[in-house]
Amino acid sequence: MRIGIVCPYSLDVPGGVQLHVMDLAETLIELGHEVSVLAPGDEDVVTKPYVVAAGRTVPVPYNGSVARVSFGLISATRVRRWLTAGQFDVLHVHEPLTPSLSLLAVLSARGPVVATFHTAMTRSRALAAAQGLLQPALEKITGRIAVSELARKVQVEHLGGSAWEIPNGVSVARFATATPLPGWAPGERGEVIGFIGRYSEPRKGFPLLREAFVGLARQRPNLRLLVAGRGEPDEALDGVPDDLRERIVLLGMVSEADKARMLHSVDVYVAPNTGGESFGMILTEAMAAGTPVLASDLDAFRRVLDGGRAGALFPTGDSAALARTLTALLDDDGQRAALAARATAAVAAYDWPVLAQRVLEVYATAIEVGSGAVTAP
């Protein structure tokens, strides 16, 4: 099958949607399909042979973060050119209502179109108000996928339809077989807790974890916090006493390989997010690595962690509860091992080869409903 996939956000800035697109594309290629991915960005950011760069990007505030997107006449021309050259059996766009390449592709394409919805803004007034303007695009989508129950709820409440629920995937083998970072093997640095994400982004909840860490570090002289992600070091260490700063280790941005290695370097992975999450990809990555997870009691996280059986939960936004639960986990090797074992069993359902087969079923349905190969006017 010839498959065209459109990512709305630039691949040079890591994010959940971008990782989803790349992992799905590579899994489909491994299964024998021909795949081309169109994404915002210049040629110099393209590192994969199956990725086509659509040109210059612009930053746009979105869902508490900043997304780099491509839009306008030049982008529309490149989308049509890519569609014409691709002669795809099916077009798969991600976040089709974002003002970027996915929306342009839906508006330009004729034929089978599948759309994956990642966000879960169930009370979005802007989305409800724009439904009339977006209706032409929605009517051209022949198959819808939502990555979570909350994302599927958006379809029902705001977009006049439903969707197959197929969650974000994880390459289980890649995370399960990784080794710790040099010098961070279990026991080498004492007790280690981990955080991955944009620590300058409020909804990621890093200040909650930092507050809990400062309190615990006084009681646990061997406790360290290992952090990977974007942000200014001074901001990450804001309010941390001088004598504790060296126990917070900032790795900066890390590769996917080093992210897996980092997850093998910590005793507990903490996800203190405060909201705006439709799934929890980092949770499945930690689960695949065999790392015990402690996460905010967000609905999306609770679903991934099987209601708290595959990972511990604490009340969202409560740093004191975070500290108490973290203390209990660090003090109980058996509990951590039990959580990791249940997580390993639960994460098998999120393995990309398993999910890709479900995506292919949606493609087949869309092709049956659609009218021939994907073309552009």
Image: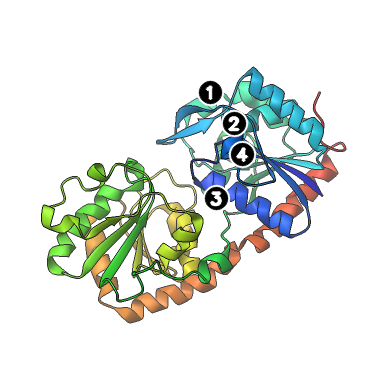
CA gap between label 1 and label 2 equals 13 Å
| Circle 3 residue | 149
Q: Mark 2, residues whose alpha carbon is within 10 Å: few (<14), some, or many (≥20)?
A: many
| Circle 4 residue | 7
Q: Quadrant of residue 91?
A: top right
1 or 2: tag closer to the N-terminus: 2
Q: Which mark is residue 97?
A: 2
Q: Position of residue 225 (x, y in %)?
A: 27, 60
CA gap between label 3 and label 2 equals 18 Å
The label nearer to you, 1 versus 2, is 2
Q: Mark 4, residues whose alpha carbon is within 10 Å: few (<14), some, or many (≥20)?
A: many
Q: Considering the numbered disc 3 on the image, is that residue within a helix, a strand or a loop? A: helix
3 or 2: tag closer to the N-terminus: 2
Q: From the viewer's perspective, tell me whether residue 4 is left or right of residue 193.
A: right
1 or 4: tag closer to the N-terminus: 4
From what the image shows, is residue 207 above or below residue 8?
below
Q: Position of residue 296 (x, y in %)?
A: 35, 56
Q: In the image, what residue occupies the spot 62% across and 21% down?
A: 133
1 or 3: tag closer to the N-terminus: 1
Q: Mark 1, residues whose alpha carbon is within 10 Å: few (<14), some, or many (≥20)?
A: few
Q: Considering the numbered disc 2 on the image, is that residue within a helix, a strand or a loop? A: loop
CA gap between label 2 and label 4 equals 12 Å
Q: As shown in the figure, which amino acid type bears the numbered disc 1? A: Ala
Q: Nearer the viewer, residue 231 or 139?
A: 231
The label nearer to you, 1 versus 4, is 4
2 or 4: tag closer to the N-terminus: 4
Q: Considering the numbered disc 4 on the image, is that residue within a helix, a strand or a loop? A: loop
